[in-house]
Image: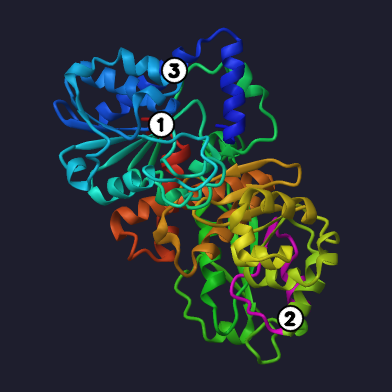
Amino acid sequence: MKVVSAAQMRQLDAATISAGVPALRLMECAGKGLADTVQHLVAPPARIGLLLGSGNNAGDGCVAARYLQGAGYQLRIFLTSDPATFSPDAATNWQRLPRHECEIVPESLRSTEALTTCTFLIDALLGTGLTRSVQSPLHEVIVAANASGVPIVSADLPSGLSADTGMPLGVAIRAQHTVTFGLPKLGHLLGEAADYVGRLHIVDIGIPSALVTALADVPVINGPEVFAAHWPARRRESHKGDYGAALVIAGSRQMPGAGYMASRAALRMGCGTVTYALPEQAYTRFDLSAVEVMMAPCADDGSGFFTPASLSALRAVLQRKEAIAIGPGVGREEATRALFLQLLPHCASPLVVDADALWALADAPSVWSRIKVPWSITPHPGEMARLMGITTEAVQHDRLAVARTCAERTGAIVVLKGARTVIAAPDGSVWINPTGNSGMATAGSGDVLTGMIVGLLAQGMATDHAAAAAVYLHGIAGDLAIQQQGEEGLIAADLIATIPAAIIQSLHAPREPIPRI
């Protein structure tokens, strides 16, 4: 599903109206979809509080109130302005609402206590057109609604949230559910949106599909429809060699577990064999418990870090590998940096470059163009800032643009990690990932993602599809893991354990029963 800016959504609305669909019809569909969502969340005769602004968002709220009233709900309407100032379409639907059956709360009675008399609140205060900080009296209304503790359903976008950046404009509604109309907006997925949007529901309001298809150069929400058709096929008559050999070059005496987790994650993605190459002194300290991972200790001058002395062993182990991951836990020793800058241009299989290997590359942009195989990089915002020579704040301010620019400069598939991971390709394609949770902000989570990507690359999946699939399934694995561990208790190993269930849930129908012979 495509994701649009506020301006693009206005253009779609205008084009739909020009095609013969009345604006009031669009508002009717939006309001009915909002009401339908509320009815799935709470049964009548619950009291619904409707927070009304004065723009078209208020019109959506009035339509929803009419449907809810007809379904047996009690309506309490909190005005924030004189209805005489409503937009024309909002005013029309205000007149259509049987107001004599509603309790109308005057502008002077918008206290938190008044709101707590409701079971649910509908936020229809501000729409997608807001571009400056929320002003009084709406500022006070939003603060009171958030403080009330009453669950909130926002119409189109939580009031006060930027539709383009996902950042609160001074203050914003913290919704449990957001019902958006037509297409998701950038502000539902970027910035701090995850803390405000809650669960996102998308309502079809009748935008012609041809208009949506014609949208070019817009991000897409990542999901199985992006990569399922490219998922590696498995034959009943097969062996491990059919599913690829991956190499993970990672670890140091300080962090031997990073490459180990990446290796196990690659196996969980269906990869046939995985070899973990690590410094010799790190290997001697390593307590191996996953016998499925093959180990390749490399000479390290006794330091426990990769050094130029490791090059010969690494070149040998690179042979007959379908995909390579480099970087988790290798450290930032100058000797390690020198080794990787020498090694990367000579890799002959698709690459995933992560963590401290990215740190090495940031100081050597000339190496980027010397990498001749398909490759992907998986920076967090701090690593991206170093790669691009900007601040972390600048990265977070416009994650889409930064990821696109990085992909264009490096020629790599860029996986910019975060609450809504952004995947960008050199051709300008962008996917925004919807899965995952705060429990995944834990040591080793990124190493697991690197392993998942290289596991798919080894099975022949193209770099862009492998990145999209791994990021999506990584989030699903996290969402499954917190059902048992909770967000606070989640560790990276929990993600590895739930990868198989994530794949089954996202991609596979139940297998046929074993035939009787």
Using the image as rendered, state which of residue 421 and residue 492 is in the foreground. Answer: 421
As helix, strand or loop, the secondary structure at mark 3 comes to helix
Residue 1 appears in the rendering: yes
Asked if 394 appears above or below 104 in the picture, the reply is below
- In the rendered image, the residue lying farthest to the top is 20
Residue 311 belongs to magenta span: yes
Q: Position of residue 435 (x, y in %)?
A: 46, 47
Quadrant hosting residue 489: bottom left
Image disc number at residue 512: 1
Q: Earlier in the sequence, mark 1 or mark 2?
A: 2
- Give the residue number, with chain letter if any, for mark 2: 310
Q: Earlier in the sequence, mark 3 or mark 1?
A: 3
Q: Is residue 14 left or right of residue 439?
A: right
Using the image as rendered, state which of residue 9 and residue 304 is in the foreground. Answer: 9
As helix, strand or loop, the secondary structure at mark 1 comes to loop
Distance between mark 3 and mark 1 Cα atoms: 54 Å
Residue 379 appears in the rendering: no
Foreground label between 3 and 1: 3
Stretch in magenta: 310-333
Type of amino acid at the residue the image marks with label 1 = Glu
As helix, strand or loop, the secondary structure at mark 2 comes to helix
Distance between mark 3 and mark 2 Cα atoms: 71 Å
State the quadrant of the N terminus: top right
Which residue: 75% across, 57% down? Answer: 349
Which residue: 56% across, 21% down? Answer: 13
